[in-house]
Image: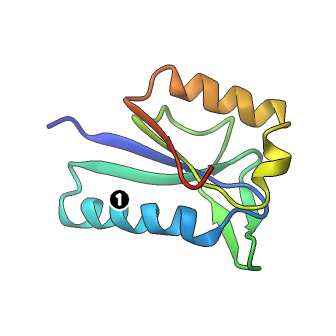
Amino acid sequence: MKKRTVAIVLFNDVEELDFAGPWEVFSYFHEENPEWCDVHTVSETGGEIRCSKGLRVIADHSFATAPPADILVVPGGHGRRREVNNPRMIAFIQAHAKHSELTTSVCT
């Protein structure tokens, strides 16, 4: 079985459940069978993200440092309204979607 790299995109005002749920599921797979997948979060600049309900999280990678993703998860939330007009976000998703096995969104 090929080890998959899972990237979960973060942005300000992202809905917590939309990224935390997938992160928990993929992280469980990694914990039980580390050879199955690696999971990381990625945001435009890396660093701190403030989610829609106020939770603060630290992205593992910036767009510039993110490894190629086999599975790309794009969550929803109020911030998506801004991000649909962010050329750097669109370019990142397009670039990774070209090579990923699965590109998915949550509530978007």
96 sits to left or right of 27: right
Q: Quadrant of residue 48?
A: bottom right
The outermost residue toward the left is 1
Residues 13 and 61: in front is 13
30 sits to left or right of 48: left
Check the image and tell me how it is coloured: rainbow
x, y (%) of residue 71?
41, 39
Give above or below for 29 relative to 71. below
Task: Look at 20% across and 35% down and name the residue there.
Answer: 2
Task: Look at 20% across and 49% down and name the residue there.
Answer: 35
2 sits to left or right of 10: left
Task: Look at 25% across and 61% down and name the residue there.
Answer: 29
Give above or below for 58 relative to 44. below
Q: Residues within 10 Å of mark 1 (few under 14, many from 20)?
A: some
Give above or below for 83 relative to 24. above
The amino acid type, in three-letter code, at marker 1 is Phe
How many labels were placed on the picture?
1
Q: Quadrant of residue 10?
A: bottom right
x, y (%) of residue 38?
36, 50
The outermost residue toward the top is 98
x, y (%) of residue 65?
63, 38
Residue pointed to by mark 1:
26
- Looking at the rendered structure, the secondary structure element under dot 1 is helix
Task: Look at 56% across and 63% down and name the residue there.
Answer: 18
- Quadrant (top left/top right/bottom left/bottom right) for the N terminus: top left
Give above or below for 63 relative to 101. below
